[in-house]
Amino acid sequence: MTEARTLKIKTSLARQMAQPGGRTVAEVERRANERLDRHRDDVMITVAGTITELELVASAAAPGSEPQVYKLASSLLDMAGFFDTGPLYDAGYSLCEVADRMAVSGAWNWPSVQVHVRAMRMILTGGCQADATSDALLMGLRSVAAKART
């Protein structure tokens, strides 16, 4: 019986990767973040527009517009999640959670939505900074979310 032999084949990719040089992971991450930051202002304008849409939906409180709340809030999270928006992201997430729970239970409460939207506007106006004001707003939103769970 012949003995099996193992051959090591070096592909062109393996040869290229074995060569010295290239970029470090830290350098690639830094460059990616720089490129992403170029879009921050445009994204924050879009986030502000989404909050305006939420304000219109919440103030109208029209029957049948409830699904719009979750759709707009999740869209806000999709955009804000790429940047450090701290308390704004947390407030948007809380609104998604509240809207989802109210939709499932069938007990919709527009004032809960309005409170979240006003808080998001205040946080955005404050520059999305984590401070005593945003902490107090988030604490209030947590109590609204806790009430939606019951």
Image: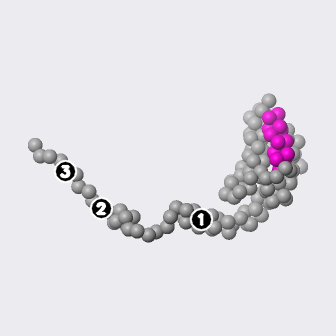
Q: Which callout, 2 or 3, points at the residue further toward the start of the chain? A: 3
Q: Which residues are magenta?
A: 134-148
What residue do we see at 81% from left, 45% from top? 138
* Residue 78 x/y as whole percent: 68, 54
Which amino acid type is shown beneath numbered disc 1? Answer: Arg
Colouring scheme, one of rainbow, by chain, secondary structure, one colour: one colour
Q: Image height check: is 11 above or below 66?
A: below
Residue 103 seen anywhere in this rendered image of the structure: no
* Residue contact between numbered discs 1 and 2, judged by CB atoms under 8 Å: no
Magenta stretch holds residue 146? yes
Screen quadrant of the C terminus = top right
Q: Which quarter shows the N terminus?
A: top left
Q: Residue furthest left?
A: 1
Instruction: Read off the residue under disc 2.
Output: 10
Residue name at image x 73 percent, y 66 percent: 42
Q: Which residue is mark 3?
A: 5
Q: Can you say whether 96 is above or below 76 in the image? A: above
- Amino acid type at image mark 3: Arg
Q: Position of residue 93 (x, y in %)?
A: 74, 46
Q: Secondary structure at mark 1?
A: helix
Density class for disc 2 (Cα within 10 Å; few <14, some 14-19, many ≥20) is: few
Q: Is residue 125 left or right of residue 38?
A: right
Which of the two residues, 96 or 8, is positioned nearer the viewer here?
A: 8
Between the C-alphas of marks 2 and 3, the distance is 16 Å
What amino acid is at disc 2?
Answer: Lys
Dot 3 crowding, Cα within 10 Å, few <14, some 14–19, many 20+ = few
Work out whether residue 147 or residue 72 is closer to the camera in this orientation and state it: 147
The residue identified by callout 1 is 30
